[in-house]
Amino acid sequence: MVHQVRRARLDDAEEIRRIYNVEVTTSTVTMDLVPRTIEDQRDWIAARSGAHAVLVAECAGRVVGFGSLSPWRPRPAYSPTVEDSVYVDRDHHGRGVGFDLLSCLVETARAHGFHSVMARIAAGHAPSRGLHERLGFVLVGTEVEVARKFGRWIDIDVLQLRL
């Protein structure tokens, strides 16, 4: 199945929300606890442009995954660093969607002159960790028991790609 990666538009909000909210309510790939409303999702897309992009993977006219670059930390000295996020519709796992999205995010970060891309991944989430390592990300640390979801403590692995 062929997919194409492009910049997200506001009219992608419902598809992005659909993919994201499944993970909010059933997994630890995001630490969000409350599903997004359509208004939340539109606001999230509208707040991201230029270097802090939202990209979508589209297949047969349907959004099957999305990814974004966000500021790593709010303090100005961190501005050369961004954090990536990638989410793929569960029906499209294992088809290269995540790889293509993350590759395009890395290229977007490089084109905008960033120095590093960071990833924060729930420890033990092998697919996401493997995806990042395939693109050259390396583990730089583990934050121990920094999140709590579904009644359990979650460690977060921090990976970095220097551009």
Image (cartoon, helix red, strand yellow):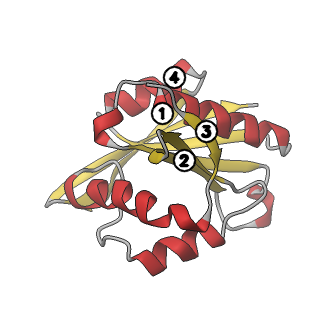
Q: Nearer the viewer, residue 113 or 63?
A: 63
Where's the C terminus, which quadrant?
top right
Residue designated by label 1: 98
Mark sitting earlier along the chain (4/1): 1
Q: Which amino acid does label 4 sit on?
A: Glu
Q: Position of residue 153 (x, y in %)?
A: 22, 54
Q: Which residue lies furthest to the bottom in this view?
A: 39
| Image-quadrant location for residue 79 | bottom right
Q: Which amino acid does label 2 sit on?
A: Gly
The residue located at (47%, 77%) in the rendering is 40
Mark sitting earlier along the chain (2/1): 2
Residue designated by label 3: 5
Q: Where is residue 18 in the image (x, y as percent from the top left)?
A: 34, 60
Mark sitting earlier along the chain (3/1): 3
Q: How far apart are marks 2 and 1 (CA)?
A: 8 Å
Residue designated by label 2: 67
Disc 1 is placed on an element classified as helix
Q: How crowded is mark 3: few (under 14 residues within 10 Å), some or many (20 or more)?
A: many
Q: Distance between the residues labelled 4 and 1?
A: 12 Å
Q: Which of 133 and 53 is in front in this view?
A: 53
Q: How far apart are marks 3 and 1 (CA)?
A: 10 Å
Residue designated by label 4: 133
